[in-house]
Image (tube, grey):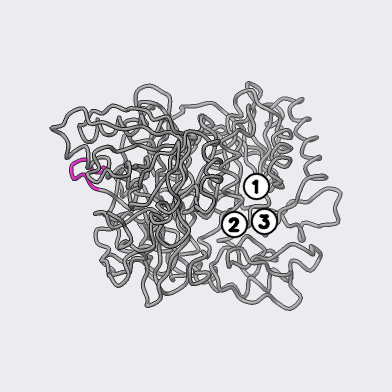
Amino acid sequence: MDTPPESRRAGAPPAFVPLTPLVVAGSSMSPKTSTFPLQRPFLAAASSPFAGARLPGTPPPRPAAAPGAPPLRRHGGVAVAMAADVGADVGAHAADAAAATTVADAAAATDVAGGDGEAAPGRSFEAEISRRRTLAIISHPDAGKTTLTERLLLYAGAIQKAGAVRARGNQRRTTSDFMAIEQQRGISVASTVMTFEYGEHLAVLLDTPGHEDFAEDSFRALTATDNVVMLIDAAKGLEDRTRKLFEVCRLRKLPTMTFVNKMDRPAMSAFEICDQIEAEFGLACLPIVWPIGDGDRFRGVYERSTGLVHLFTRGDRTDKAGEVGPLPLDDPAVADLCGADALEQLREEIDILDSCGHTYDAAAVAVGDMTPMFFGSAMTNFGVELFLRRFIELGLPPTPRESSVGEIAPAREQFSAFCFKISANMDRKHRDRVAFVRVCSGTFTKGMKVSHSRMPGKTLALTRPTQLFASERETVDVAYPGDIVGLTNPGTFAIGDTVYTGGTRVVFPGIPAFSPELFAYIKNSDTGKYKNFNKGLSQLLEEGAVQLLYPRGDEGQTEPILAAVGALQFDVVQQRLRDEYGVDTKLEPLAYSVARWVVGPGDDPWEALTAAGRLFNVLYAKDRWGRPVLLFKNSWNLSQLATDAPDLELQSWSFAPDDVGAKRK
């Protein structure tokens, strides 16, 4: 059953025990000097000896550290305290830092009743930034990514029933997989944005497609997030798609948390999974919770910071999980419910973790060198709420971003944002296109006038902005850094575009289109639907669902060539043309597998191509911007070009041109 928009923001976390010190066995650290997270950052107070010794919870600028305090490291412009010299004086340094943390004090002193991106009365701009968390989930197909997304929405109060990707009846209708092709095939083919309140915080969740044919869409979503959850199938460990997506996260130094899913099925041991992550990714694993058994012997998880056991029970998969406890580890009921053998094994494993495992390092987590780990079962709703609470505590708020004018902090007064995704036909009645824009700095207001990075001298009015929740949209009047806003796109925006205010031109790094590997002519089966055919191709092209090329000399653009990374992209385009535009099509595959854009020498790539002379075993084409693209049958033909035309400069990706006027007809 659909939930009315106003009820989505009503979710609030239940009362729970704050994080408490973890005594590391075999170390010289007392509870007062442990570097494990000790309490919720938004509950930190100057009176606490640990306040401020946390992951960064406020945007820059941060106050200077107290004399003699641990050194500061920059993570995208956010200063984070390093735990380089953990000793008896850590508590004193942390207290000094907390006393100077104005943003946390301001947030605690304001009224927190409000939502939908609007500042509550008295809430400061900095507090609005501090309370936001943006999260993208990455995984291999079938690891349970969409299922985890549904459960997070359930526990946040954003939906009343959680759907399942493969199920019957009402369970089949997932929130994030709202496209017809996604519901029919049981896969995600496009990233989805969902915004919801959780307690005092506002979360922006991006569900990315796991299938390798839609890797570009996942990459775009990762450019818009500040935090990542790496979802792992407990039975399979690290898989190919997870490895590739993690490399993108590593390049961007994104904080990465790990959720090991499907613990209610036979699984690898938790130690094996940790060893695999550390060996392959070089990440320090820090289990926040530890599983008790797996498969039929799965009894729950032990929360290391509180010493509490959360016991597993199977219930209705669409509702919140029933949970026994949480109970202290020494509670006799734990032994009765878990069994003596399981309890003894748990104690042994906890001793190993405490004596040999890592301690919490805020700086390492902030730059993606340490991953907090969670275990659970998204399908049975177990461990999801605990993860959500801890993510809100440990996740980073919006961080500064590099641009053409240097690093731009979220608290910068001038507004700036970039487009990372475009969706066509979100409203079938109006055939509209929506540009997904990530706010990076300043305050967005409805109707504001901005400059466009590729339209020098032109001003745009951003009217009809919306806040996104999967396929549904609500009008939004104001948005802050970290928010994702939907803007009506009449063809003005391309993926990677920047909009900004102020007299200085701002351009964030572009989002590239990668080299396709499959090519096919696409033919309209009904000439009477020529207009719908062209409109559909144009809008799906803007969306990035596929790339579109034309043979050189096809001035009338009558022989479009679909170019894709995987065959499933062809299927999606054909089905969407049929379902959304009423056009049946057929494909004629081409015997080419490599594409390269001509970029030089010189300023005009077409002149460079002409100067190179005749090239053999090559198909000359042009992209949507009129730039030359060469198609090769195989990599050997590509390498041969180095001999035939050594001066020709090629590249395997492309960006939208810097100036719209540069587009070649």
> Answer yes or no: do the residues labelled 2 and 3 have beta carbons within 8 Å?
no
Examine the rendering and report whether any part of residue 322 can be seen.
no
Residue under circle 2?
40
Secondary structure mainly formed by the magenta segment:
loop
SS at circle 1? strand
Relative to 215, does residue 568 appear above or below in the rendering?
Answer: above
Distance from Cα at disc 1 to Cα at disc 3: 14 Å
> Answer yes or no: do the residues labelled 2 and 1 have beta carbons within 8 Å?
no
Q: Amino acid at mark 3?
A: Leu
Q: Is residue 150 magenta?
A: no
Q: Nearer the viewer, residue 450 or 271?
A: 450
The stretch of residues the image draws in magenta is 425-432
Kindly identify which numbered label has been placed on residue 372.
Answer: 1
Q: Residues within 10 Å of mark 2 (few under 14, many from 20)?
A: some
Distance from Cα at disc 2 to Cα at disc 1: 15 Å
Q: x and y percent of residue 68 in the render?
A: 76, 75
SS at circle 3? loop
Q: Quadrant of the C terminus?
A: bottom left
Residue under circle 3?
38
Q: Residue furthest front?
A: 613
Q: Nearer the viewer, residue 548 or 501?
A: 548
Q: x and y percent of residue 620 in the render?
A: 38, 42
